[in-house]
Image (spheres, rainbow, N blue to C red):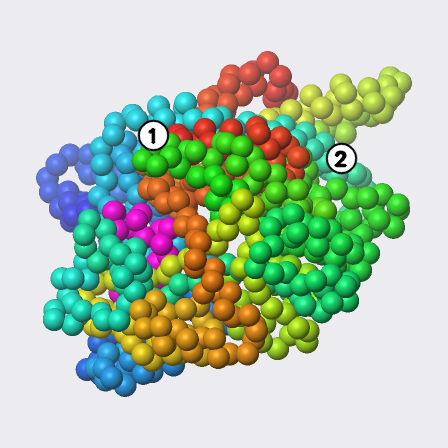
């Protein structure tokens, strides 16, 4: 396709067509060439697979025998399946724990590291380290830290005379364990975004408020938070999308267990495909998840008009 | 940046992109390992060889290649819990091994999916001889032989004799029931010393067996509905669940450690262990006395029997050689004696004289129990959506063990889930 396009481009250069048209062609071509490096992978690895999964979702497919057309059956079965409801509930549970924790923690860090202090740059780098670490490494590390039998967390609690919980082996504690590990890893990301937002707030506002006798809390409430709202909005959108797609840490730390208590949507998609040979249902569930994420994001974009302040 | 790209540079960019694409395409092409000159390569994928019997498999491969100098068998192994994911993905991706191991539970799934080669079509006039008829029949589907039985194994009660002697408790015997096992387990558990009386995982494979020991059935006679949500089912589940935290370590104490039970037994801190005869080889050198008995039952005896077979991929290009290898692994005297000498499960041969060799090994002393356990067996229920059923049952049992649900509730939920899978 590219080669034909080139040839056409050359021909148009020498042909007696009006110049503006030729220039437009060449401009479009130039743009296309610059876009290609990202358009090719985007098409090959995102758009084509998405179309493929949409097609697959309308079939029954065990990965081995040829696909069989079932129409919307996969969607209908999934919507009626209590396992699907449980998976979405577990995912919402994760988000409900993760989002406030990672936002509050990130905001606290950002505020602390926004002040002039020694070793500030080192600390910023240190807090960002987990963000660039592989999820598998982080999940394995937390699995060991929180190991109920030999982990350092329960060992430390034991020294203090507290009997630590079973963490990821206890159905009631497994999700909190995963939330904890996830918040820890993503703190640095939220911190960096909010830090940039904090630095964009003019110092004069704070100075003026201080002169007027506003307390630290009042300044935080009335200046910092409102002016930080664009960054907050960005963090919430990204974290929500990540939250809905939670998988790596779950797969490594609990594999959806114990007793299915951490069976989140993407883990369910994985199981459907690779354990149960139901690639069609897995694709349908992927699209249901996509729809939910899209809906939530659209609602957020709508709602942001009411609370995000672009000053 | 120049506003208009010179034609030469433009062409260079296009060429570079094209080259990159070609390079990627070549890099991602998966090729089968090339055979040595003039040899045909037969790939074999197995879960039962690693880690204890890789050498024994090598012995069988060497003997086969000696008889068939034009064939090169390439062995690939994977642990059981990853094996079927890998197998399924390789079948889907068109990179399936020529031959691979299948267990009885998963055979139906693969045979009915059409991913297995009808071995009758490549056997010619060389059928596998000397195999036990019931083993052969287990791997027939629609009247066709889709796999050849390669080995079978049973689950027994392994016990640490020294622990029993030290506590002054008589060692288990063949007529023990759950009640005796429980009484002994309670006396032998010494949590301060880290010693546990019993170990029996709370999961599907223990459940269908204990269910049968309690006189219950997993499915109705016609196989269309579950039958385990019954008094026998409740009894079996209660039996399994009641051990956790009392005579057996909890999940938290196990802490997800791999081979926890094996290591606990090997370190002399586990008195009774429900496990398979495939553990024998690994227990050769433990510094204490151990032996086995047929698993205690409740109202009746029932021992789990597992069958493994070797099948060929429907898409293999070397069907004849694949069959020759499958046949050799299944029924050759070399394979049978290698298995027997190394206690690598049991060969599915009909010749009792060959099997008698299994009893010659001095450890464990009561090897006869392995054959005795065959007198009353519990075969795993097999349905088309096997893995989902196993996961559903295990999940509900775990819920009961963790105290999240009552035994009755967990069983009712498990039955509802499995019924949905059958429907």
Is B417 located above or below residue B129 in the figure? above
* Residue at x 76% of width, y 18% of height: A222
Residue A133 seen in this snapshot: no
* Labels 1 and 2 share a subunit: no
Of B207 and A144, the residue lying toward us: B207
Sort mark 1 into few (<14), some (14-19) or many (20+) by Cα contacts within 10 Å. Answer: few
Please tell me whether residue B5 belongs to the stretch shown in magenta: no
Q: Is residue B422 left or right of residue A59?
A: right
Q: Nearer the viewer, mark 1 or mark 2?
A: 1
| Dot 1 and dot 2 residues touching (CB under 8 Å) | no
Is A256 located above or below residue B175 in the figure? above
Give how far across and how far down residue B220 sits, in percent: 38, 35
Of A197 and B231, the residue lying toward us: B231
Q: Is residue A69 left or right of residue B86?
A: left
Q: How many numbered discs? A: 2
Kindly indicate the quadrant of the structure image that contains residue B242: top right
The residue to which callout 2 is attached is A108
Question: Considering the numbered disc 1 on the image, is that residue within a helix, a strand or a loop?
Answer: loop
- The stretch in magenta equals B95-113
Residue B423: numbered disc:
1
Of A112 and B232, the residue lying toward us: B232
Is B216 located above or below residue B161 in the figure? above
Image mark 2: chain: A
Tell which residue pokes out farthest to the front in this image.
B175
Image mark 1: chain: B
Of B190 and B211, the residue lying toward us: B211
* Residue at x 72% of width, y 28% of height: A202
Residue B41 seen in this snapshot: yes
Give how far across and how far down residue B299 sits, in percent: 54, 44
Kindly indicate the quadrant of the structure image that contains residue A89: top right
Tell which residue pokes out farthest to the top in this image.
A306
């Amino acid at each position: 396709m590219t080669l034909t396009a080139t040839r056409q481009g050359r021909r148009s250069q020498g042909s007696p067509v009006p110049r503006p048209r030729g220039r437009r062609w060449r401009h479009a071509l130039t743009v296309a060439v610059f876009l290609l490096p990202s358009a090719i992978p985007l098409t090959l690895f995102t758009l084509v697979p998405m179309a493929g999964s949409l097609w697959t979702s309308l079939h029954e497919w065990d990965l081995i025998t040829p696909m069989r057309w079932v129409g919307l059956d996969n969607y209908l079965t999934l919507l009626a399946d209590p396992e699907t409801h449980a998976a979405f509930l577990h995912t919402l549970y994760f988000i409900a724990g993760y989002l406030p924790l990672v936002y509050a923690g990130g905001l606290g860090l950002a505020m602390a590291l926004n002040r002039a202090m020694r070793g500030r740059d080192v600390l910023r780098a240190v807090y960002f380290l987990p963000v660039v670490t592989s999820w598998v490494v982080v999940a394995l590390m937390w699995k060991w830290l929180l190991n109920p039998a030999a982990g350092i967390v329960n060992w430390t609690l034991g020294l203090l005379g507290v009997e630590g919980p079973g963490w990821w082996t206890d159905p009631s504690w497994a999700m909190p364990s995963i939330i904890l590990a996830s918040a820890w890893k993503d703190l640095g990301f939220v911190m960096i975004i909010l830090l940039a937002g904090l630095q964009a707030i003019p110092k004069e506002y704070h100075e003026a408020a201080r002169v007027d006798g506003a307390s630290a809390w009042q300044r935080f409430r009335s200046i910092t938070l409102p002016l930080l709202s664009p960054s907050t909005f960005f963090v919430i959108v990204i974290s929500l999308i990540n939250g809905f797609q939670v998988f790596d840490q779950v797969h490594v730390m609990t594999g959806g267990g114990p007793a299915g208590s951490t069976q989140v949507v993407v883990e369910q998609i994985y199981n459907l495909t690779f354990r149960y040979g139901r690639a069609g249902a897995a694709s349908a569930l992927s699209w249901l998840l996509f729809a939910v994420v899209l809906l939530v994001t659209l609602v957020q974009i709508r709602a942001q008009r009411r609370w995000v302040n672009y000053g | 940046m120049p506003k208009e790209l010179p034609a030469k540079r433009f062409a260079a960019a296009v060429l570079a992109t094209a080259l990159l694409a070609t390079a990627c395409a070549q890099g991602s092409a998966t090729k089968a390992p090339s055979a040595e000159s003039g040899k045909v390569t037969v790939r074999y994928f197995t879960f039962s060889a690693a880690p204890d019997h890789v050498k024994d498999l090598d012995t069988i491969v060497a003997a086969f290649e000696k008889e068939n100098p034009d064939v090169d068998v390439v062995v690939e192994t994977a642990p059981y819990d990853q094996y079927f994911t890998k197998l399924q993905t390789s079948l889907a991706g068109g990179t399936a091994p020529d031959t691979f191991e299948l267990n009885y539970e998963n055979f139906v799934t693969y045979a009915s999916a059409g991913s297995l080669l009808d071995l009758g079509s490549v056997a010619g006039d060389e059928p596998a001889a000397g195999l036990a008829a019931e083993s052969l029949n287990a791997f027939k589907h629609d009247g066709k032989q889709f796999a050849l039985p390669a080995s079978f194994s049973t689950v027994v009660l392994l016990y640490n004799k020294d622990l029993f002697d030290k506590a002054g408790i008589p060692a288990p015997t063949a007529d023990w029931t759950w009640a005796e096992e429980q009484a002994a387990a309670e006396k032998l558990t010494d949590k301060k010393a880290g010693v546990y009386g019993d170990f029996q995982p709370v999961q599907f494979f223990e459940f269908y067996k204990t269910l049968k020991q309690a006189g219950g059935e997993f499915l109705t006679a016609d196989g269309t509905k579950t039958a385990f949500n019954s008094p026998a089912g409740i009894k079996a589940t209660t039996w399994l669940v009641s051990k956790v935290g009392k005579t057996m370590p909890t999940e938290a104490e196990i802490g997800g450690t791999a081979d926890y039970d094996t290591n606990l037994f090997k370190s002399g801190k586990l008195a009774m262990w429900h496990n398979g005869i495939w553990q024998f080889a690994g227990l050769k050198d433990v510094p204490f006395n151990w032996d086995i008995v047929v698993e205690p039952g409740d109202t009746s005896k029932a021992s789990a029997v597992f069958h493994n077979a070797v099948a060929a991929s429907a898409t293999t290009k070397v069907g004849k050689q694949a069959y020759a290898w499958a046949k050799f692994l299944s029924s050759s005297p070399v394979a049978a004696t290698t298995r027997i000498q190394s206690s690598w499960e049991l060969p599915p041969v009909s010749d009792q004289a060959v099997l008698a060799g299994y009893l010659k090994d001095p450890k464990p002393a009561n090897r006869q129990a392995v054959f005795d356990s065959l007198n009353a067996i519990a075969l795993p229920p097999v349905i088309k959506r096997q893995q989902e059923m196993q996961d559903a049952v295990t999940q509900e049992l775990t819920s009961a063990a963790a105290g999240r649900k009552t035994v009755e509730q967990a069983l009712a939920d498990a039955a509802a889930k499995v019924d949905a899978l059958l429907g």
